[in-house]
């Protein structure tokens, strides 16, 4: 096991290993602009599996004077507002991309990049222990919200880097298998629908 991991305290919190910022401060609704030069990741572009559906990301034109915090590969987007609170990993998005205010942007601190992978942190935030923590600390009645301080204090388990990579690789395989199975189910249903249509209309 990595000696640095061994020497770390057991009560690691997310804020110990990562910086956490709010999403871009859009005022009002985010208006799509096909001629815009900025891409915007919104909650509807993400999945609880930790993925971002890039084909659905819109472009817009920023009107605020605030310097955008452009997303980088390895950033983690945490859905802070809504019925579900999960994380998605930023990978290979266009250079000028921001996220909506419904997210917190989690970025691993440089000092920890050799000790923890963004994929592992993203995966861990979506697992049952962290999810239970968010469920018991979220605020609101109909529209639940996780405050930044709550996210900062979510417990993080540190494992050897190779173990982290093994777990996230298993996760990626499981997601691929689920997609294949879902496609097989949809294909079979289309076959059955075609058979039923032919049998009942001839």
Image: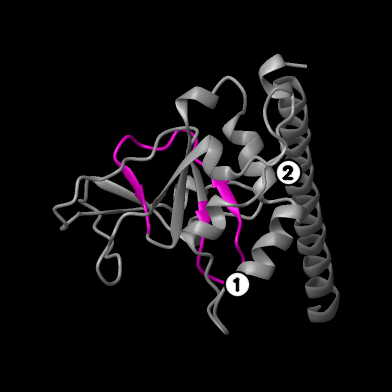
Of 38 and 140, nearer the camera is 140
Q: Is residue 72 left or right of residue 47?
A: left
Residue at left offset 74%, top offset 51%? 127
Q: Position of residue 160 (x, y in %)?
A: 74, 23
Residues at marks 1 and 2 touching, judged by CB atoms closer than 8 Å:
no
Q: Main secondary structure of the magenta part?
A: loop
Name the image quarter holding residue 93: top left
Residue at left offset 83%, top offset 73%? 196
Instruction: Decide: few, some or many residues near mark 2? Use Cα within 10 Å; few <14, some 14-19, many ≥20.
Output: some
Residue at left offset 74%, top offset 20%? 162
Q: Nearer the viewer, mark 1 or mark 2?
A: 1
The answer to whether residue 159 is above or below residue 97 is above
Residue at left offset 79%, top offset 80%? 201
Instruction: Decide: few, some or many residues near mark 1? Use Cα within 10 Å; few <14, some 14-19, many ≥20.
Output: few
For the image shown, how many numbered marks are present on the structure?
A: 2
Q: Which residues are magenta?
A: 78-100
Q: Position of residue 134 (x, y in %)?
A: 65, 63
Q: Which residue is mark 2?
A: 175
Q: Which residue is mark 1?
A: 83
The answer to whether residue 102 is above or below residue 179 is below
Looking at marks 1 and 2 on the same chain, the residue that comes earlier in the sequence is marked by: 1
């Amino acid at each position: 096991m990595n000696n640095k991991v061994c020497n770390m305290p057991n009560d690691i919190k997310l804020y110990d290993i990562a910086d956490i910022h709010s999403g871009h401060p859009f005022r009002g609704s985010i208006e799509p602009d096909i001629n815009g030069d900025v891409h915007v990741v919104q909650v509807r572009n993400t999945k609880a599996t930790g993925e971002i559906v890039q084909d659905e990301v819109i472009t817009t034109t920023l009107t605020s004077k605030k310097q955008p915090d452009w997303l980088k590969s390895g950033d983690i987007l945490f859905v802070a507002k809504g019925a579900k609170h999960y994380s998605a990993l930023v990978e290979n998005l266009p250079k000028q991309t921001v996220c909506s205010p419904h997210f917190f942007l989690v970025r691993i601190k440089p000092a920890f990049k050799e000790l923890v992978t963004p994929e592992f942190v993203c995966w861990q935030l979506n697992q049952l222990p962290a999810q239970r923590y968010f469920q018991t600390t979220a605020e609101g009645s109909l529209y639940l919200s996780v405050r930044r301080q709550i996210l900062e204090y979510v417990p993080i388990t540190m494992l050897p880097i190779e173990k982290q990579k093994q777990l996230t690789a298993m996760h990626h395989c499981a997601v691929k298998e689920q997609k294949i199975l879902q496609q097989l189910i949809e294909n079979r249903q289309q076959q059955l629908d075609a058979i039923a249509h032919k049998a009942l209309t001839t």
